[in-house]
């Protein structure tokens, strides 16, 4: 670590990345091309499924591993087709917004 920043944004690491890849190929908030905010949100399992499961599975205390596995299985099976369709539609909208944002940054028509 240099001056307290995390390793991936230390001055020497950033210089090495610039040397090998150039500014335009590095996706980081510390370079000109920023990665989309909360990029894990681009994956439906990350932005919806795990949060949903945590809410419903841990809603009440769990006695043992077997009960945990059973609850996860039960709640996965209880997800409706309509819910999954909605999740996919929202994911597509997120991709479209990112495409529009990146296009406007890069001046792509």
Image (cartoon, helix red, strand yellow):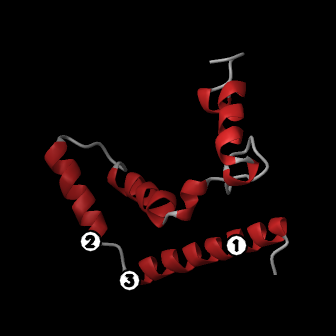
Q: Is the residue marked by circle 2 packed among few (<14), some (14-19), or many (20+) residues within 10 Å?
A: few
Nearer the observer: mark 1 or 2; the answer is: 1
**Neighbour class for label 1 at 10 Å: few (<14), some, many (≥20)?**
few
Q: Quadrant of residue 73?
A: bottom left
The residue indicated by pointer 3 is 81
Q: How many marks?
A: 3
Question: In which quadrant of the rendered view does residue 96 lie?
Answer: bottom right
Using residue 78 as the reference point, say whether residue 63 is left or right of it.
left
Give the Cα distance between marks 1 and 2: 33 Å
For marks 1 and 3 on the same chain, the one whose residue lies earlier in the sequence: 3
Q: Label 2, on which residue?
A: 77
Taking the spot 26% from the left edge, 71% from the top edge, the residue there is 77
Of residues 69 and 4, the one nearer the viewer is 4
Look at the image and tell me in which quarter the C terminus lies.
bottom right
Label 1, on which residue?
Answer: 99
The image position of residue 22, as x and y in percent, is: 72, 47
């Amino acid at each position: 670590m240099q001056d307290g920043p995390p390793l991936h944004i230390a001055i020497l690491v950033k210089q090495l990345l610039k040397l090998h890849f150039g500014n335009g190929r590095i996706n980081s908030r510390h370079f000109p091309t920023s990665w989309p905010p909360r990029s894990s949100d681009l994956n439906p399992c990350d932005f919806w499924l795990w949060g949903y499961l945590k809410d419903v599975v841990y809603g009440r205390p769990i006695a043992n591993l077997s009960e945990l596995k059973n609850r996860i299985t039960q709640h996965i099976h209880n997800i409706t087709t309509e819910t999954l369709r909605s999740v996919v539609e929202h994911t597509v909208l997120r991709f479209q917004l990112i495409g529009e944002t990146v296009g406007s940054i890069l001046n792509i028509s």
